[in-house]
Image (tube, helix red, strand yellow):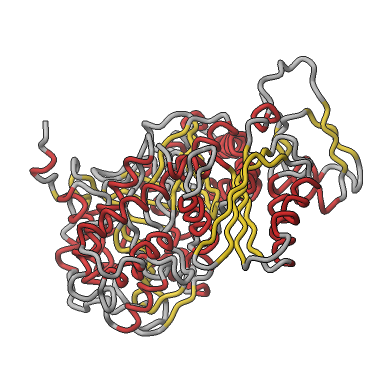
Amino acid sequence: MQEVVTRTKIEELKDRSELKVLVGTIITQAAQELIKEKGIVLQFIDDDNVPKGESDEVENNAERGIVTVIGRDKVGIIAQVAAILAGSNINILDISQTVLQGFFAMIMIVDLSGSQDDFAKLRQKLENEGEGMALKITLQHEDVFRYMHRV
Amino acid sequence: MVALPFSYTTDEIFETIRMVELENLDIRTITMGISLRDCADPDLKAAGRKIYEKIVRSAGNLVQVGDELERSFGIPIINKRVSVTPIAMVAESSGDADYCYLARVLEDAAREIGVNFIGGYTALVQKGFTVGDRRLIDSLPQALSETEHVCASVNVATTKAGINMDAVYTMGKVIKETAERTASKDGLGCAKLVVFCNAPEDNPFMAGAFHGVGEPECVINVGVSGPGVILNAVRNQPNIDLGTLASRIKQTAFKITRMGELFGRAASRKLGVPFGVVDLSLAPTPAVGDSVAEILEAIGLERVGSPGSTAALAMLNDAVKKGGAMASSYVGGLSGAFIPVSEDEGMARAAAEGALTIEKLEALTCICSVGLDMIAIPGDTTAETIAAIIADEAAIGMINKKTTGVRLIPVPGKKPGDYVEFGGLLGRAPVMKVSTYNPAVFIRRGGRIPAPLQALTN
């Protein structure tokens, strides 16, 4: 059974002390807040007795994302976006571009499995870089499109 | 059209992006239902400990998993919630009458795991009260005033059982007392209390969520949102006939609901908990453009509440259901358009302008979920009048074999036209006028309105 760490348990610990928990332990929201507040260092340890199931990493391997870029056409858009993706070790599987109601619109299918950044961070990075170039860049999980447009 | 390796068209991709970026497409709630049937104990304090432990263990990482899903799909989840077995059933085996203790336990558990609401401070009394039901109902005003995250509901009628008019009257008094106890917050306690007819057992929406007795040990239910997306679909088609418009709404509802299905399945897998249902409800928020009223107005009404509102809502509600039903393997809960007043900016505006009255809202509840929802009424409205409004709604639900609910807030000291601010998702609304003709004699008769012919289906 999974261990649960609650706020009460964290309250018993000294500031900036170390807490060792098994991988997969549930740490409640209230406990997490207090851990931050008290500067407690969390250490996750593997329990060899627990049989390892399919981990999230395996699942992530199949993950593909769709990057869209919208904005006024200008020199170097593809190069710049590709550079951001390359910087996070993301492979571009396919690119298509079109002009949508006078706007440049690009769609990239990317392979996220080798990504050095997690999805949220990458999303933020693309969004920020996009703003600098007066472009709207979004990153979405492929599943979102698959679910929405195909039964 | 550009060919892509997964056969999505450019239009499809940009449609999805537009829904998320511009039209407030979001998941309204992921609600984990948890059975507390094994937590009953002759000692109420012991029951409380078991309840707390079970909720924290089952839903300890619900918020975390929700946050992960938000990040990995890039679509916000507005609320993470927990619903539990009706507390009246769990508490009943104890002789202790202080059920408020359990409300505080639920509150503590909600704070510990960081959910937005916890529902299930509930009693089901459509045919009569047990000892536990009475104690729970008596404790409601205090429990709702002492807690912030706990939501309560009482089912006073079903199509199969009729209407328990004693319970209806009691709830009129409970709503009054709850408002008075939370007078400093404009009667906010009442916003966490729904009186139901035909309450669904797997509803993920608050304040009426509870984990029904026929439900499994633990389950994930998802409520979708998306009025903004439907609104845009309607606005883009000003010149098509209603049949074609219905079809367009249906297609859009399908897409919204698919997101609920995606999130439900993903959450269920990550939490190791079975997936229950997607609730297809169109749930508005006070944000501009995320309003069911505005959809009705975009269909062609000057203001919601005008003649034609009921027909337009019937079309909308039905189209949402047809599209949604195709999109999910399991549909349940309330599944229909919500028409709350304070939570929907367009409804609140129509009410303030006098276009929308309680009587028209009552008519609208005949055809959609869920009922007279989040309506501020004058503080001097009597318990008998509130009870009579509940009875009317319950009658509509009973006869039409549908869920109806009443969530009224008799705001202490406020008169029709005054504004009330509830904050957050609960929004703001004008106090609406209520008929002052007196139904007290009818209500004081008490007893039970027999189940209608509609109940005799076997």
Query: Which image quadrant for residue B64?
Result: top right
Q: Does residue B272 appear in this view?
A: yes
Where A24 falls versus B318 (above or below)? above
The answer to whether B372 appears left or right of B343 in the picture is: left
Q: Residue furthest left?
A: B453
Q: How many marks?
A: 0
- Front residue of A56 and B156: A56
Where B293 falls versus A92 (above or below)? below
Q: Does residue B167 appear in this view?
A: no
- Please provide percent x and percent y for residue B434: 26, 76
Query: Which image quadrant for residue B56?
Result: top right
Locate the N terminus of chain A by quadrant. top right
Query: Which image quadrant for residue A99?
Result: bottom right
The answer to whether B327 appears left or right of A28 in the picture is: left
- Front residue of B34 and B205: B205
Locate the C terminus of chain A by quadrant. top left
The answer to whether A41 appears left or right of B136 in the picture is: right
- Please provide percent x and percent y for residue B105: 58, 46
Where B400 falls versus B180 (above or below)? above
The answer to whether B122 appears left or right of B55 in the picture is: left
Q: Residue at x 41, y 48 (%)?
A: B255
Q: Residue at x 35, y 82 (%)?
A: B352
Q: Residue furthest front?
A: A75
Q: Residue at x 18, y 74 (%)?
A: B307
Q: Residue at x 85, y 32 (%)?
A: A20
- Please provide percent x and percent y for residue B458: 11, 30
- Front residue of B1 and A31: B1
